[in-house]
Image: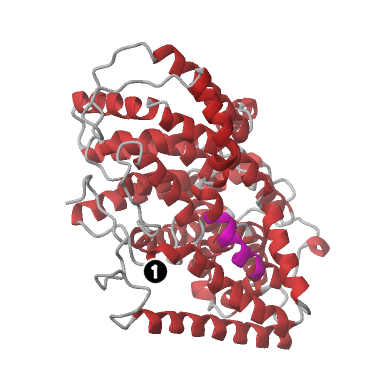
């Protein structure tokens, strides 16, 4: 398979620039130092920007004074432990970890793909890939190679299956009709950023759920068309020259695993039915005092993360014990431990991120940047939709160099969210635009941690596969997803369809 020269040159440049960037944790540490320095330099400068929270002119606080540094050191531990995204992710991952390491999630994905008619194989692969986001890395390590195996077993080109699954797992990363840990994770960053301008601002963890659910159908449709009409015809003459002995086999579930999956799925359904039964009565303790379920004061809205934990823990345990994966309570604890081991890097990054966000807010630099930036945008008099499109494309570009979704939003959120709030654009809409841009370019950056792994999956079937080969396969998906998903968001917005629970398009909400 030939690779375009311009493609390889572009890839080389991206890789060269990306490799020069420090680790995200170091970026946050450097940003913390920059905030300290700027706070000292600008603390004696008079600004005309008016703080909407107080009605007073914005004054930058010097964080390098003796008192402020002493206060910072005395609060360092509580700044970290009180960092909202930290608890959100860790609690959710405890439950997801049990479901993943017991084998429940992989068994469910296998069964879904195994029972799919050949004519619907492509959309089902993409749909399963999208759903796999719920289990963090399961899509990359299970669904993508499995898709290649299934396509190969059905006489279709395996690279087309890998490309379709990669498009679903990574290109459609923020399209999912099942709430997952990524929802409250991004929401917590959004809320922290919004409170730079409005300390009383509350953002619902499911603020993009309706839009993400509708986007699932869009991403599946785009991926289906690109795979069957563009990618597979292009691969028609590409010979499969991999070592057949190294090509993995699609192993069906045995009787014990099938039985375990049946009981685990039943237990999950029982849990959901029980939750619904608790929510139905008007006097339900999960409702707000006024009887609403979607109010911020409703316990159900404050329990999204614990519910994710429980609804994965229960079937994970059932599957583990019935299948024999778990034989004692120690196995459950080991599964949770493995899940936490996988989050160790995130914890380190969260430490520096928490310190940066706290300093950014305390210095008033965030408010100043948001207000001045908003004034600039108002001067340009760009329509709100043009501004949102700009956010989407800027995020897609930044994503080529900084892979972590949460790390990017931790950096960009404190700038984008307050700035657009000053233009009467809600944090909910800004977050939706960010998620769209973040997803669309995942599949064309070699700096994405799993990109080289996908190249290896392809090499099992076509030995000559390289980074340029995979890029050429994924570029049509990326462009189509970015453009059509952007149009979809604008149309969704124009029709006024709710983005999610307690979400709005404007700030303050009308």
Work out whether residue 489 or residue 27 is closer to the camera in this orientation and state it. 27
Stretch of the chain drawn in magenta: 88-98
Residue 318 in percent (x, y) is at 65, 81
Q: Is residue 7 left or right of residue 286?
A: right
Q: Nearer the viewer, residue 468 or 275?
A: 275
Question: Is residue 241 rendered to the left or right of residue 418?
Answer: right
- Expressed as whole percent of the image width and height from the top left, the position of residue 124 reads 51, 70
Residue at mark 1: 300
Please name the colour scheme applied to the rendered image: secondary structure
Q: Secondary structure at mark 1?
A: loop
Of residues 152 and 171, the one drawn nearer to the viewer in this rendering: 171
Residue located 65% across and 53% down the image: 238
| 227 vs 418: above or below | below
Residue 69 position within the rendered picture, expressed as x and y whole percent measured from the top left: 54, 24
Q: Is residue 1 visible?
A: no
Q: Residue at x 72, y 60 (%)?
A: 337
Give the image location of residue 131, x and y in percent: 51, 65
Residue 21: image quadrant is top right
**Whether residue 37 is situated above or below residue 377 in the rendered picture:** above
* Residue under the image location 77 percent in, 56 percent down: 242
Q: Is residue 128 left or right of residue 26?
A: left
The rendered magenta stretch, by its main secondary structure, is classed as: helix
Residue 12 figure quarter? top right
Residue 152 shown in magenta: no
Q: Within the magenta stretch, is there residue 96?
A: yes
Residue at the right extreme of this rendering: 245
The quarter of the image holding the N terminus is top right
**Residue 309 in sight from this viewpoint:** yes
> Total marks drawn?
1
């Amino acid at each position: 398979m030939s690779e375009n020269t311009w493609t390889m040159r572009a890839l080389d440049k991206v890789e060269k620039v990306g490799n020069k960037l420090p680790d995200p944790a170091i970026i946050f540490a450097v940003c913390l130092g920059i905030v300290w320095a700027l706070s000292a330099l600008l603390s004696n400068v008079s600004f005309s920007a008016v703080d909407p929270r107080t009605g007073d002119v914005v004054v930058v606080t010097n964080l390098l004074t003796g008192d402020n540094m002493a206060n910072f050191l005395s609060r360092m531990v509580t700044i970290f432990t009180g960092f909202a995204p930290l608890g959100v992710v860790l609690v959710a991952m405890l439950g997801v970890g049990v479901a993943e390491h017991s084998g429940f999630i992989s068994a469910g994905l296998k069964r879904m793909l195994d029972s799919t008619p050949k004519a619907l194989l492509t959309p089902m692969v993409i749909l399963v890939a999208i759903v796999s986001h719920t289990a963090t890395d399961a899509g990359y390590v299970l669904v993508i190679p499995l898709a290649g195996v299934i396509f190969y077993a059905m006489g279709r080109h395996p690279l087309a299956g890998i490309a379709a699954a990669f498009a679903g797992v990574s290109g459609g990363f923020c399209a999912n009709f099942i709430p997952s840990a990524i929802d409250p994770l991004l929401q917590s960053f959004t809320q922290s950023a919004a409170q730079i301008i409005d300390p009383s601002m509350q953002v619902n963890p499911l603020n993009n759920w309706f839009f993400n659910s509708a986007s699932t159908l869009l991403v599946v449709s785009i991926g289906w068309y690109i795979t069957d009409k563009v990618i597979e015809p292009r691969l028609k003459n590409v010979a499969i020259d991999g070592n057949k002995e190294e090509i993995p086999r699609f192993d069906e579930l045995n009787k014990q695993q099938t039985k375990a999956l049946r009981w685990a799925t039943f237990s999950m359904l029982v849990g959901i039915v029980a939750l619904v039964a608790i929510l139905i009565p008007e006097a339900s303790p999960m409702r707000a005092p006024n009887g609403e379920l979607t109010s911020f004061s409703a316990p159900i809205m404050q329990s999204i993360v614990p519910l994710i934990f429980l609804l994965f823990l229960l079937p994970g345990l059932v599957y583990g014990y019935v299948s024999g994966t778990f034989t004692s309570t120690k196995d459950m604890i080991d599964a949770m431990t493995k899940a936490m081991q996988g989050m160790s890097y995130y914890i380190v990054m969260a430490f520096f991120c928490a310190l940066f966000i706290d300093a950014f807010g305390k210095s008033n630099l965030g408010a100043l940047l948001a207000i001045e930036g908003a004034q600039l945008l108002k001067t340009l008099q760009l329509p709100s939709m043009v501004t949102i499109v700009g956010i989407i494309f800027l995020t897609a570009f930044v994503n080529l160099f900084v892979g972590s979704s949460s790390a990017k939003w931790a950096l960009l959120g404190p700038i984008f969210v307050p700035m657009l709030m000053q233009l009467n654009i809600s944090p909910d809409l800004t977050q939706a635009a960010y998620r769209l841009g973040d997803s669309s370019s995942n599949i064309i950056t070699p700096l994405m941690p799993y990109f080289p792994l996908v190249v290896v999956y392809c090499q099992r079937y076509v030995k000559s596969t390289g980074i340029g080969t995979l890029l050429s396969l994924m570029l049509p998906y990326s462009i189509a997803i970015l453009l059509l998903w952007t149009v979809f968001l604008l149309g969704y917005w124009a029709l006024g369809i709710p983005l999610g629970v307690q979400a709005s398009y404007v700030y303050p909400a009308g």
